[in-house]
Each structure stands twice: as C-alpha cells, then as structure tokens.
Amino acid sequence: MQDGRLDLDYDAEFRRNWGLKATGAAAAYAMGATGRGIKVAIIDTGMEGASEDVLRNVSPNSIDLIGERSWTSERPHGAHIAAALAAARDGNGLMGVAPEVTVLSVRADMDRPCRFSGCILSGVDIAEGIDYAVERGARVIILSLAGPKRLPSLEPALQRATKAGEVVVVAAGNNGKTQAGWPARYASDPAFGGMVVAVGASARNGQIAKYSNRAGKARNNYLVAPGDRIVVSCGDLGCERASGTSYATAYVAGAVALLLDAFPHLDGREALQLLLNTARDGGRGGVDGVYGRGHVDIAHAFAAARATTESLLATAEPQPGPQPGPQPGAGLQPPEAGPAS
C-alpha cells in the first residue's frame, strides 16, 4: 500500500472487478480512504477458503459460534463476501472495495449439510452474532442471508445494534420477487431507526439483476450495488466469479467504511444517509419499488461529504472581534476571514 491512490502497479487489480469502477470507488482512494481502522462484521459461514490477501485483514477476534463441527465440507460463502469487501490491495489477485478494513468474521451457519440454495443460519445464532459484533466494536454488520419469514428471535439484538449506532447491511435475496426478503425487510421498520439497509444486486450494465429481490416496502432504505459475476477469488488457473445480493452487501458496507475512514466526524447514521441521498437513480425517477434509492455511488457520496465538511469548517472559522483604532467608517475596510483550511 502506498498512499491510497491508484497507480500503474495496482491498476490491473483495480480493473479486475468491474464493481469498483461502477461504484466510483476511485474517488475514495484518491483521498487516501481504504477503510483502515473501521471494523466490519460478516455474520456468515466463516473464512474457510479465504486467500492470504483476505486473511491479512481478518480480526483475531473472529469466532465460530458453533464450536466443534461434524460437517467439515468447505463453505466459502463468507470468505467470498470478505474478498469483495476487504481483499488487500497488493498487486496480486483481486482487490476489495475497502482494502484495509478490518473484517470481524462471525461464523454462525448451522452444523448440518448445506442445501442447494445455501447454508442455514438460525435467528438465535444470528442474534448472538450481532451482539458479539457490537461488543467487539464493529461499526458495520453484514447479514448476507435471506429467507421468506420474519425472524422475531433476532429482533432484540438488531434493535440493540442499531441503537448503538451500527449500520446493518442486509442482502435483499435472490428470488426475483417484488419485496426484499427477511431480514432485509426490517429496513422498512421504524423500530430500527433507519439503520438497516436492504441491498439488491446490479449487473454490469447498471440494471438490477433478474434474480435480485426488488425494494418493495423497503424502498426508502434500499440500495442497489454490484452483485452479478463478481470476482471472489483468484488463483494460478484464473479467477472465480459469483453472483447474488450477498456480494452486493460488500460494496455497500465497504462504502460506509470508506466514508467513516475519510471523514472521522461522521457517525454510521450520517454515512448511510449520505449513500442513500447520493445514490444514482435507476428507476423511473426518484425513490421506487424496484431500485429503492438507486445504485450506490461512492464518488457522489464523497463529493457530498467533502462539501458538507468544508461548509462546517467555514462555519466554525473564528470571526474577528472588534478591532482597536479606526472603525470601518473612518476609512479602513473590515477585516476578512481567510479561507477555511
């Protein structure tokens, strides 16, 4: 890592994943933002199969809530989310959207065979994982999971997390339905204070992927992000790609982390609101039931954050008090405040 700016040594790594350009992430890197110092929890299947450029950013406080397991088949879903989020920028393989963020991996998949549609997590285990993430200082929590039913057993933990200021980023689901699945649909519930954001997947053409669940009732806290054919690992024989709203959560969580890194005065609520307010419209105009607030736009969010920061600095600039000697009416011009630094 040099100074956070793109250069020729790392350009190929940047270009390998189309989602980085599509979200305008280069604007964050140009300011030196990498997610350093920001902890993002991924409650999923752990880091099985993760490459070295991912593992170097994984916290030693990561945990498997189940403990000893009888089913030992590799389950790389969590590692792939972590790669899209946090693969280090080292000139090899791939690069995550926030390449110096700290990943707190909370493995919570049940100790049983995974079905065709994926591994299973219980509401009780997810709730335990959320509490663990809050206790260990995560600023953002990724729930890259979706189901058809409300999960009352995780709601108290979700409330504790959002009241503590955590941003909870949840996959909308991959059933092509008009409504986001659960727990993403909690994004529309005022009990969580607007701190839950549902995330749909976009394809390379910028359109929402056919399989992605739409915003529906969660439209006011729903974003679309790259999720189709995302590079999730690279090796000697080439790179592996995967698709789904799970991978889109990495881009939204990474965008929050980049904002919190670059603008330390922001809290999670403010960072999320910036992303919602600056999202690139993808529907018929304005907030809608398909794209929600629109496609995440890191470059636009950073421009808005910079403008707000400069405005705050100008407002806080000390104003000159009464000056001794002749007053303005006696031939001197009033002193001018200098530019905000």
Image (tube, rainbow, N blue to C red):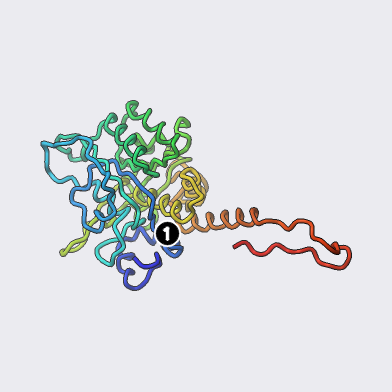
Residue placed farthest to the top in the image? 152
Q: Where is residue 34 in the image (x, y as percent from the top left)?
A: 39, 58
> What residue type is disc 1 on?
Ala
Quadrant for residue 95, please give it.
bottom left
Residue placed farthest to the bottom in the image? 8
Q: Position of residue 75 (x, y in %)?
A: 18, 45
Quadrant for residue 104, please give it.
top left
Q: Where is residue 99 in the image (x, y as percent from the top left)?
A: 34, 58
Residue at numbered disc 1: 33
Judge the density around disc 1: few (<14), some (14-19), many (≥20) Cα neighbours within 10 Å. many
Residue placed farthest to the front in the image? 324
Q: Where is residue 318 in the image (x, y as percent from the top left)?
A: 67, 56
Q: Can residue 174 be seen in this view?
A: no
Quadrant for residue 322, please give it.
bottom right
Viewer-side residue, 287 vs 264: 264
Q: For the C terminus, which image quadrant?
A: bottom right
Q: Which residue is drawn at 29% across and 41% down?
A: 43
Q: Is residue 327 visible?
A: yes
Q: Residue at x 18, y 62 (%)?
A: 235
Above or below 123: residue 307: below
Q: Which SS class for mark 1? A: loop
Q: Residue at x 31, y 42 (%)?
A: 144
Viewer-side residue, 269 vs 335: 335
